[in-house]
Amino acid sequence: MIHDPQDTSVFPKLADEEVAWLSAHGDELKLEAGEYLFLENESVDSFFVLLEGELRVLRPVEGGDEEVATHLPGEFTGQLAVLAGNVPRFRVRAVAPSRLLEITSGAFRRVSAERPAVADVFISALSRRVRENQDWARQNEKLAALGKLSAGLAHELNNPASAARRAAASLRTVILDAQETALRHDGRFTDGEKERILALRREVAGAGVDAVPLDGLERSDLEDELSEKLEERGVEEAWELGPTLAGAGLDAERIEAFADGMEGEKLAGALAWLATTLDLLGLAGEVEGSTGRISELVRAMKEYTYMDRAPMQEVDVHEGIESTLVILGHKLKGNVEVEREYDRGLPRVSARGGELNQVWTNLIDNALDAMSGGEGMGHLKIKTSRDGGCVKVEITDDGPGIARGLKGRIFEPFFTTKPIGEGTGLGLDIARRIVTRRHGGDMRVDSKPGETRFSVRLPVGAGEKDGG
């Protein structure tokens, strides 16, 4: 369902008395569920007022039909063909038994002469629908361009990133083998000492560099303690070894146990070998992690734009939200704590995944901007739940809130509270239209100082509603 009951500008309803007056100038028409009123590129010389039932406007696209709008009783369709003489680019189908009033072009001219106010309703709606279609065309062009860019980037980045990740994983093995071979041939150490060094390496490398989470002050204290202990044992330039050993989770007690029987230059050589090995493994790990991040971003980009998928999909809202969080990761890192309260048992919704992701992007990005001026870590909460026949998504931030006088205007086109050049004022307007007109849901906002919550409700898929 793609109807926004809060916005009658694009799909205005006629008052009962106007419909009754028009009835004298038209003929009644009945359609059964599934029957078409007219098809695209079909000559139409009438427009139609819906008296009972429900009509769905469909646009043919590759792989099926894309839903454009839904008409409810009191609304009308076909006036573009009558007023502008255009051949319709859409098809209109009844989704329930429907009763309509057909007004021919000749009858409409008589209506316009006798009842100009009624004609103004049709003409004004026509103008707004044309503008909205142009807006959606521009938006779809941007999405298509993003999809093409994503496809190119996915191909160009994913293959070398995957190869680099495999190479980094292999590099760890090569580093360990090469370092062990070098140690085996080092004449400074006995066989027993070599085994002791390798045992310590296996202990800390198995846990990984930075295995012990320490805050900055704790780590600095541990580095100082290790450096002092090594200097006491005659290790020169101990300050160079301290950071790596501390990062590996080694404390003074463990170093004391390892150093038993080794002093001065020999101990320095053993620990230098260990520190070098750990540094090399850490660098290989950074390469592996970075290439993994590239692969994750490519995956998120493909999910975000719904590359190579039909317009309508049965969508898991959590997947789209998580892809959006990955895309916005640069704004989250170190600044915002994300709390997820997901109901993983939610049904999928029949939706245009790429468009829904625009909704999550606008809402989350606005929340991040709202929290950016505060002190300390921001808190973003995303909650999903079942609300009757709908899936409900709530996005809450702990920013300053929306001023009472502005709350009623935030969905207006071109209205923004951001500085000049930082916002177009279209984000929330587009998000709300996607939710209401394109997916038959609703969007609401509640705000007070320290808490702003946007709630989005989306109808579940047709199969769910039918019990199938």
Image (cartoon, grey):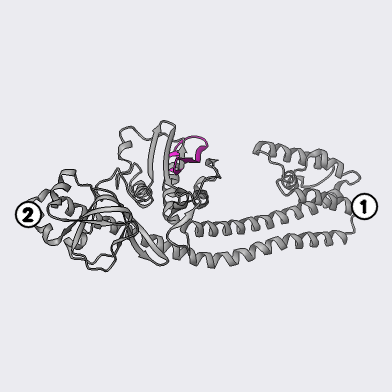
* Label 2: how many Cα within 10 Å (few below 14, some 14–19, many 20+): few
Q: Residue at x 74, y 43 (%)?
A: 246
**Residue 378 among magenta residues:** yes
Q: What residue is shown with label 2?
A: 113
* Label 1: how many Cα within 10 Å (few below 14, some 14–19, many 20+): few
Q: Secondary structure at mark 1?
A: helix
Residue 166, how many percent across, how many down? 67, 63
Which range of residues does the magenta coloring cover?
Answer: 369-391
Query: Is residue 131 toward the left or the right of residue 423 in the image?
Result: left
Q: Residue at x 38, y 62 (%)?
A: 65
Instruction: Identify which residue, 314 or 199, lies in the foreground.
Output: 314
Q: Residue at x 36, y 43 (%)?
A: 418
Query: Which of the numbered marks, if any, corresponds to residue 153?
Result: none
The answer to whether 440 is drawn above or below residue 181 in the figure is above
Query: Which of the numbered marks, if any, corresponds to residue 192?
Result: 1
Task: Give, as a three-letter code, the residue at label 2.
Answer: Ala
Q: Nearer the viewer, mark 2 or mark 1?
A: 2
Instruction: Identify which residue, 423 or 383, lies in the foreground.
Output: 383
